[in-house]
Image (tube, rainbow, N blue to C red):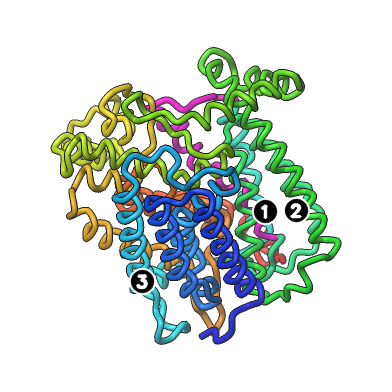
Amino acid sequence: MVSKNSPIIQFLRDSLGIALILAIIIEIILFPSLENFFGCAMALISYSIFRFFLKDFYVINYPFTFFLYLSMFLYRYLPLIATILEMKPITFGFERPYITFIGETAWFLMASLAFYLSCNHTNAISKNNILQTTLYKYKFYHSNAVIFWSMGIIGILVKLYTLAAGEIELGDVTGKFFKALEYFQYAPLILAFPKLSKIEYSKRNLVFIYTIFVIILSIASNSRRQMLIPIGTIVLLYFLYLVVSKKKISELLWTKKFLAIIVCGYLIFNIITNLSVAMLYNRTLRNNITRKELFSKTIETIQNQELMARLKVTNNNKQNQLEGYHSGWTENYLDNFMMNRYANMRISDETIYYAEIRGYASNVMQLDFFKKNIAVLPTPILNFFNINVNKLDLIHSRGDILYGKGFGGYRVTSHLGDGLATFGYWYFPLQFVILLFVFKLTNIFTLISGNKIFYAPFALLTVFSFLGRYRNAGGIIGDFGYLTRGFIQDLFTYLLVFHLIYYIIYFLKPSLLFHK
């Protein structure tokens, strides 16, 4: 068991605490009100609990489960920090602040208990369960540089195919299968972190060049989410690497590498922000032109400095507009699109508002929940059991159903608002049980063998998905989908591609399988 925290963990514990205290002081001075006090209390309680789990023990032994838990914490911590930076109260636009903050605090307490119970606290070097043992036999935890590069090539080819094919239509089984393999493009990135991959790879420059290419390819996708994935993957892998390596702060701060990272981070942030503005401006064209034409339009927009300046002013004015929910669905909260995606607490407030209109434990929400859980199963399975579900009738989001109109708008929802609207207060014990299953399953991505910890390559190259799992999206339906299909599908596709590559190499040149 890890007894002492690494320098980077201690630095984060202190930094998060200092930033929170400063934000609370500024909030109380600039926006003194009882509603904002409740928001500060939510952030403070969440930080106090999270600080207990921000230890080497959890990060090293349960990194991917920890990243799930981290996403839950950030959703309740970042709104206060982000709104203060933009000189707004945490309750900007809220109409149900008390129940939102109390409900989200209760949700985090429940999730924290589930996280605690899912981890083994008596002995970190414990026996692996039957699922881990079985996956070990199928080489699920096996690392090899040649295989990683082969996976990367497959991922790049799939990415190029999906870029050329455009949007994947419902019912396009081939397109969906290829889309599910896109994440393989990130496999070579693991080679830059030998402590994680257990591979001492000497050709770091090649990995760096490949990383730049992957980032450029993600920009060409003309999707803001796709742009964030490679960058987020590198950041999380680097964080885990620092904790495992126990790097000293003096080795990280105020060095040439650190300053280079700061400069590159600043440049990348500005590039992504400009691309986001340009993408939003051209979004209405994406159904009428090809991906290549859309990308060209985006670049043209960025190069037009006068237009970009107007767009930024327009976007800022729009985000600062205080529109009530009676005027229609609104997600205006934070100016920065990344923060607005991962720290938009107003979505919780809005979904609770509409949940009250629908009524808690709504029959409409329950019926849609049941249908969507059935529809998430593969069509061949539905046909085998003679279950007739028209998936075209279910392309709306949970947010669309909650809002009650504008189907096809793909409105996001929060776990809390969606859960109350569907199950009432019974949602909390149900979500607690589901979280236990999700955490326990995620724990299998770490294997203990010979007093060493091995991380499943699949989890390393999809690490960013864990951090994004509990942002505003589809609510609890996403958890059910992961348990009934997503988890099994991920294991199947990874092992299928892995063994395909493995046996091709075995028959062509077996020595490469032992090549480091």
Tag 1 residue: 188
Q: Do the residues labelled 3 and 1 touch (CB within 8 Å)?
A: no
State yes or no: discs 1 and 2 in contact (Cβ < 8 Å): yes
Could you say whether the residue bearing mark 1 is in a helix, strand or loop? helix
What residue is pinned by disc 2? 207
* Residue 492 higher or lower than 361, as above or below: below
Q: Is residue 415 magenta?
A: no
| Residue plotted at (68% across, 57% down) | 146
Residue lying at the far top in this picture: please name it: 288
In this rendering, would 365 be left or right of 91? left
Tag 2: amino acid = Val
> Looking at numbered disc 1 in the image, what kind of residue is underneath it?
Pro
Q: State which mark lies toward you, 3 or 1.
A: 3
Query: Callout 3, which amino acid?
Result: Ser
Compared with 474, 118 (above or below) is: below
Secondary structure of the residue carrying numbered label 2:
helix
Residue 449 visible in the shown view: yes
* Mark in front: 2 vs 3: 3
Q: Nearer the viewer, residue 126 or 322?
A: 322
Q: In which quarter of the image is the C terminus?
A: bottom right
55 relative position to 438: left or right = right
Give me the C-alpha separation between circle 2 and circle 3: 35 Å
Residue 118: assigned label? 3
Residue situated in front as seen by the camera: 34 or 191: 34
In the displayed structure, would residue 412 be above or below residue 277? below
Q: Position of residue 393 (x, y in %)?
A: 26, 25
Magenta part of the chain: 164-191
Q: Position of residue 108 (x, y in %)?
A: 36, 61
Confirm or deny contact between disc 2 and disc 3 (CB under 8 A).
Answer: no
